[in-house]
């Protein structure tokens, strides 16, 4: 049981846009920055978004992040087959004094 | 370019202690700008945050693992380590070492991961 809640799967056609949600509480998302990670099959996760909506160098602007209250959203536009991966949200939990992740969302590009 | 490399036994017997080391190159574990941590992923499952350490030695652990986990840093060797005691089959996972930064600890660098299997 993950502290943060994500949908298990999402799908869309190439070129389309979609969003992945991440729900938490006041002790984590509500009072801390959210990060998003992409994990391609057989590889380590990669940081896509940090501090809710910032992209590390090299991450295309097709990826975006937002936060409202105790929920966060990852947006992806212009979907490509190469975007098929598992996506995880993460943040700090001030009550636990530890990092927490969502359960992950498998993205399928139809 | 920062690189992280996990090392340690790939097979551990149940009830024993899992020990892994992460060697950092291209960066310094004595930097005051970063934390160093461990994340694991059981086969076919999601990510689980294990713990992290600051160069000063301050540690932060997942409460569900806290009684069994120790994360330490050796700045002279530019390495940090994980020890997980009394392992069971549920501890079988790919273990990643990582660099964390900022107040909410996003992870900007990951090791390639190492599979540790707990055998009975």
Image (cartoon, rainbow, N blue to C red):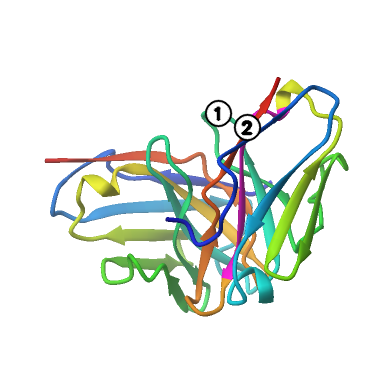
| Dot placed on the residue nearer the N-terminal end, 1 or 2 | 1
On the image, the x and y values in percent for residue A22 come to 64, 55
Q: Nearer the viewer, residue B39 or B35?
A: B39
Residue at position x 39%, y 68% from top? B72
Q: Nearer the viewer, residue B23 or A18?
A: A18
In the rendered image, which quarter contains the C terminus of chain A?
A: top right
Q: Per the image, is A87 magenta?
A: yes
In the rendered image, which quarter contains the N terminus of chain A?
A: bottom left
User: Magenta part of the protein: which range?
Assistant: A83-92
Circles 1 and 2: CB distance less than 8 Å? yes
The image shows residue B29, relative to residue B15, as above or below, that is below
* Residue B114 shown left or right of residue A104 in the figure: left
Q: Secondary structure at mark 2?
A: strand
Q: Nearer the viewer, residue A104 or A57?
A: A104
* Residue pointed to by mark 1: A41
Residue B78 shows in the view: no
Q: Per the image, is A103 magenta?
A: no
Residue A90 shows in the view: yes
* Residue pointed to by mark 2: A85
Residue at position x 31%, y 66% from top? B69
């Amino acid at each position: 049981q993950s502290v943060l809640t994500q949908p298990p799967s999402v799908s869309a056609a190439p070129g389309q846009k979609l969003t992945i949600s991440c729900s938490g509480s006041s002790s984590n998302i509500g009072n801390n920055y959210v990060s998003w990670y992409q994990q391609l099959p057989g590889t380590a996760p990669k940081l896509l978004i940090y501090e809710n909506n910032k992209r590390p160098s090299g991450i295309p602007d097709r990826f975006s992040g937002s936060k409202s209250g105790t929920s966060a959203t990852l947006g992806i536009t212009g979907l490509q087959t190469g975007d098929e991966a598992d996506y995880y949200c993460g943040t700090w939990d001030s009550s636990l004094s530890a990092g927490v992740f969502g359960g992950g969302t498998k993205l399928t590009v139809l | 370019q920062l690189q992280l490399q996990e090392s340690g036994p790939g097979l551990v017997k149940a009830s024993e202690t899992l020990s892994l080391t992460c060697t950092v190159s291209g960066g310094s574990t004595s930097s005051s700008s970063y934390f160093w941590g461990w994340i694991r992923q059981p086969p076919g499952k999601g990510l689980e945050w294990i713990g992290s350490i600051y160069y000063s030695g301050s540690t932060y652990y997942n409460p569900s693992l806290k009684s069994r986990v120790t994360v330490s840093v050796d700045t002279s060797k530019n390495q940090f380590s994980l020890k997980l005691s009394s392992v069971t089959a549920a501890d079988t996972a790919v273990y990643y070492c990582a660099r964390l930064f900022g107040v909410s600890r996003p992870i900007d660098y990951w090791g390639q991961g190492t599979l540790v299997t707990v055998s009975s």
